[in-house]
Amino acid sequence: EPNFAYISPATLAELLTVRAAHPQAQLVAGCTDVGLWVTKQHRQFAQVLDVTRVTELCRIDEAPDHTAIGAAVRLEDAFAALVRRRPQLQTFATRFAGLPVRNAGTLGGNVANGSPIGDSMPLLIALRAQVVLASVRGERAMALEDLYTGYRQNVMAADELLVRIVVPRPSAHEQLRAYKISKRFDDDISAVCLVLNLDIAGGTVQRASIGAGGVAATPARA
């Protein structure tokens, strides 16, 4: 293990220990992005740390007040969990990339990657999601929009990993709309993405959460 080229831990404790010892290792999950760095940019990685076998990261936990989605849960399964509580997201979910990508890529990978045109982040920001970061030192949680500091840059320390995304349950007065503009309708990346989440009671907006993609260097909360 001291000179590993590829390692695939089975538990979160093991993953965090390896990450602390090898902060320079390239993390991989579905490889829908890192794979392109290798095939298109001919980049090479001396050490690859695969998170997809970590049991704790592959779980979806449904609680009365939230849904906790492990970072290594496939996008298809993660969106299915979100759609169960918010059926109006079905169309938006099916427009995320294409079916092969949704069955390979992970929600945690999309969020940690931090592309300003990644489609899950505007949605999760509008849903007031929190991300949980973990290291051998412990865990910390923050609002998703607070994760990013610049273009594909985030607040994670060298030994930290994104381990889960926590999405609150819908409120009684939630009005949710998700919009995606792209050159093709199917299997395409966003030019602009906008998700509006308004609590409307008695004709008055009680609370508003608006997530936008493709408008700044990072996914943004309006």
Image (tube, helix red, strand yellow):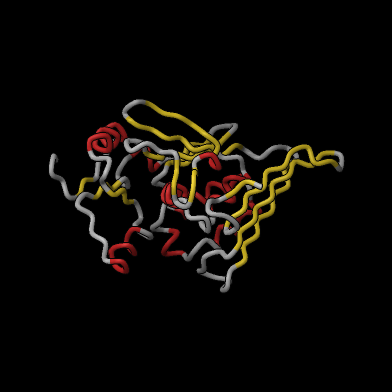
Q: Residue at x 52, y 55 (%)?
A: 116
Q: Quadrant of the N terminus?
A: top left
Can you name the residue that lies furthest to the top here?
137
Q: Residue at x 61, y 59 (%)?
A: 193
Can residue 83 be seen here? The reply is no
User: Left or right of 148: which side holds 22?
Assistant: left
Question: What number of labels is visible?
Answer: 0
Can residue 122 be seen here? The reply is yes
Task: Decide which of 131, 216 is in the foreground and name it.
Answer: 216
Q: Could you say where residue 157 lies in the image, as x and y percent from the top left?
A: 37, 36
Q: Could you say where residue 113 lies in the image, as x and y percent from the top left?
A: 43, 51
Q: Could you say where residue 123 lies in the image, as x and y percent from the top left?
A: 59, 50
**Vertical position of residue 5 compared to residue 11: above or below:** below
Q: Residue at x 58, y 69 (%)?
A: 182
User: Left or right of 20: which side holds 187?
Assistant: right
Task: Decide which of 95, 46 is in the foreground and name it.
Answer: 46
User: Left or right of 40: which side holds 217?
Assistant: right
When asked about the image quadrant of residue 194, the answer is: bottom right
Can you name the residue that lies furthest to the bottom here?
184
Q: Residue at x 21, y 49 (%)?
A: 47
Q: Could you say where residue 166 lies in the image, as x and y percent from the top left?
A: 52, 37
